[in-house]
Image (cartoon, rainbow, N blue to C red):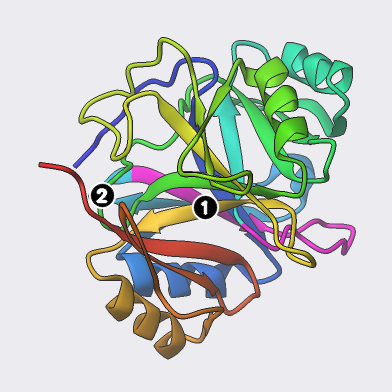
Amino acid sequence: MSERTTYEPGVPCWVDTFSSDPEAAGAFYAGLFGWELEGPAPMPGGSGGYYVARLRGRDAAGIGSGPADGARPPSSWVTSVAVASADDAAARAREAGGQVVGEPFDVPPAGRLAVLVDPAGAMICAWEAGSRQGAQVVNEPGAWAMSLLTTPDLEGAEAFYGALFGWTVEAFGEGPDAPRLFRLPGYAGGEPAQPVSREVVATMARAPEGAPLRWNADFWVEDADAATEAVTRLGGRVLGAPEDSPVGRTTQVEDPLGVSFSVSHVVVPG
C-alpha cells in the first residue's frame, strides 16, 4: 500500500475524468475499483458537480461533469502534475511551444489549476496545491499507479516536458520505438518504492498511426483478466486483449461514457 500526503514539484499528483453523466461514471468505477464517492461539490463556474473517489477512506481520483457549453469532454483521464506556481507553469508551456487552453484559475480552497496542451496535442494539467495536495493513495489495487503519454514525436515531448517540469528521459528497451521513462532528477519516489524505478514519474510511447495522442491513466488491479471481465459486466468496453510486459499485465478499456484508461496487474520486485 502507498499513502501520500505531499507531492514535490514535477511529480504527477492527481487524475480525474469528466463526463456527461458523472453519476453513471461513478457507479462504474465504484463497481470496478471499490471506490466510495464523496460529493458532488460545485464545479468552478457553476458548470456541474465534482465527486472525489475514495479508497480506504483516502482520496484516490476525481469524477466531474463535462463542459457546461456542451463541448466534448476529454476522452481519457486527465493527469495533473504538481508545480510551485500554475502561472509560471503556463508561461513555461507557452515558451516551450505548447498551448494554455485553460488559463490558471483558483479552485478554492483546494488549489490553482492550469490546463495545458503539449505541441503534439496531448492535454495535461499543472496543479498548484492549496488544501488538496493530490491523491492520498496510489500504487495499490484500486488506485492510480502511472500515467503514459502516447505521442508521434518522442523527441519533441522530451524537450517540452523537460522545459515544463524538469523531466529527463531514458529508453526502456531497444530500438527507436522503445517505450521511454520520464524521470525527475533527485526525486526519491516516496515510500514504498515505485514499481520500476524510484525516480520514474511517468512513461511515454510512440503513438501508432491513427492512435489518439493523450495521457493515459493506469490503475492497479489484483487480476488484469478479472478486471477486464468486470469492465464488460459493468457496461464498459474492452479495447484489446490483456498484454504482458516485463512489469505485469495490462488491458486498455473504456468506461460506459467512452473514457479510456488501462488496468494493470503489476509485479513488484521482491
Q: Residue at x 25, y 70 (%)?
A: 223
Q: Residue pushed farthest left?
A: 270
Instruction: Give the left or right position of residue 11, taking residue 137 as reference.
Output: right
User: Relative to the observer, which residue lies in front, 202 or 258?
Assistant: 202
Q: Position of residue 151 (x, y in %)?
A: 72, 48
Identify the magenta region: 59-76
User: Relative to the observer, which residue lies in front, 52 or 262?
Assistant: 262
How many C-alpha atoms fall within 10 Å of the one at disc 2: few (<14), some, or many (≥20)?
some
Q: Position of residue 3 (x, y in %)?
A: 25, 34
Q: Position of residue 250 (x, y in %)?
A: 40, 65
Residue 61 belongs to magenta span = yes
Q: Quadrant of the N terminus?
A: top left
Give the quarter of the image for residue 125: top right
Q: Is residue 174 above or below residue 114?
A: below
Q: Position of residue 160 (x, y in %)?
A: 75, 25
Overall secondary structure of the magenta stretch? Answer: loop
Q: What's under tag 1, amino acid-wise?
A: Ala
Q: Residue at x 41, y 89 (%)?
A: 233
Q: Residue at x 82, y 64 (%)?
A: 72
Can see residue 33?
Answer: yes
User: Residue 140's mark?
Assistant: 2
Instruction: Give the left or right position of residue 212, taking residue 225 as reference.
Output: right
Cα–Cα gap, marks 2 and 1: 14 Å
Q: Earlier in the sequence, mark 2 or mark 1?
A: 2
Q: Quadrant of the C terminus?
A: top left
Q: Residue at x 70, y 19 (%)?
A: 164
Q: How many marks?
A: 2
How many C-alpha atoms fall within 10 Å of the one at disc 1: few (<14), some, or many (≥20)?
many
Q: What's under tag 2, amino acid-wise?
A: Glu
Residue that numbered label 1 is attached to: 217
Marks 2 & 1, CB-CB < 8 Å contact = no
